[in-house]
Image (cartoon, helix red, strand yellow):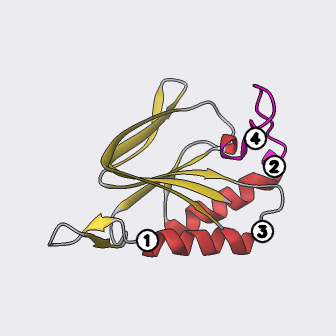
């Protein structure tokens, strides 16, 4: 499981011209699920993000965890793209939708995240804060 995490001032996701979720200060998470991922990995990664100290403390140092900040999570199978050979990426390592969706939902539920619509084409808007962007794997 891979999570591209961005610290944001605000973020939103829309589909079909309709804004379906938005957050204020917090985390935007683009989440990819691999073919061999299991529920324990979703739980472990969610817990890691909850404790990840990427927010400024009173002294302006990145030393604070998520706490009461918001999370927006968007499914992103392209995080498992393999473009080492040729110019057309392979997505063979990404889980099929029927396998990925329950793990995506479990991850989001564990974090209390707002979310995009799984499997739909979406537009994501964000104001990156920092910028702070991390790639995490479980």
Q: Residue furthest left?
A: 59
Q: Nearest the camera: 73 or 82?
A: 82
Q: Main secondary structure of the magenta part?
A: loop
Residue at 59% x, 69% y is 45
Q: Which mark is residue 97?
A: none
Q: For the residues marked 4 and 3, what is the alpha-carbon distance in whole angstroms?
A: 21 Å
CB under 8 Å between callouts 2 and 4?
Answer: yes
Residue 11 in the image: above or below residue 3: above
Quadrant where the N terminus sits is bottom right
Q: Secondary structure at mark 4?
A: loop
Please identify, in this view, whether the residue under mark 3 or under mark 1 is nearer the observer.
Answer: 1
Q: For the residues marked 2 and 4, what is the alpha-carbon distance in whole angstroms?
A: 8 Å
Q: Nearest the camera: 138 or 107?
A: 138
Q: Position of residue 71 (x, y in %)?
A: 43, 57
Q: Which residue is mark 3?
A: 38
Q: Which residue is mark 1?
A: 52
Magenta stretch containing residue 83, yes or no? yes
Q: In terms of image quadrants, where is residue 82?
A: top right
Q: Earlier in the sequence, mark 2 or mark 3?
A: 3
Q: Which mark is residue 93?
A: 2
Q: Earlier in the sequence, mark 3 or mark 1?
A: 3
Mark 4 is surrounded, within 10 Å at the Cα level, by few (under 14), some (14 to 19) or many (20 or more) other residues, namely: some
Q: Which residue is mark 4?
A: 82
């Amino acid at each position: 499981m891979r999570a591209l995490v961005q610290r944001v001032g605000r973020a939103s996701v829309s589909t079909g011209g309709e804004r379906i979720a938005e957050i204020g200060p917090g985390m935007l998470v683009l989440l990819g699920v691999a073919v061999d991922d299991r529920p324990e990995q979703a739980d472990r990664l969610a817990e890691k993000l909850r404790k990840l100290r990427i927010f400024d403390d009173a002294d302006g140092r990145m030393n604070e965890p998520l706490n009461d900040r918001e999370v927006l999570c968007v499914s992103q199978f392209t995080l498992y793209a393999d473009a080492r050979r040729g110019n057309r990426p392979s997505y063979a390592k990404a889980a099929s939708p029927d396998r990925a969706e329950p793990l995506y939902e479990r991850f989001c539920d564990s974090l209390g995240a707002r979310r995009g619509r799984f499997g739909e084409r979406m537009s994501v808007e964000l104001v990156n804060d920092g910028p702070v962007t991390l790639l995490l794997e479980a």
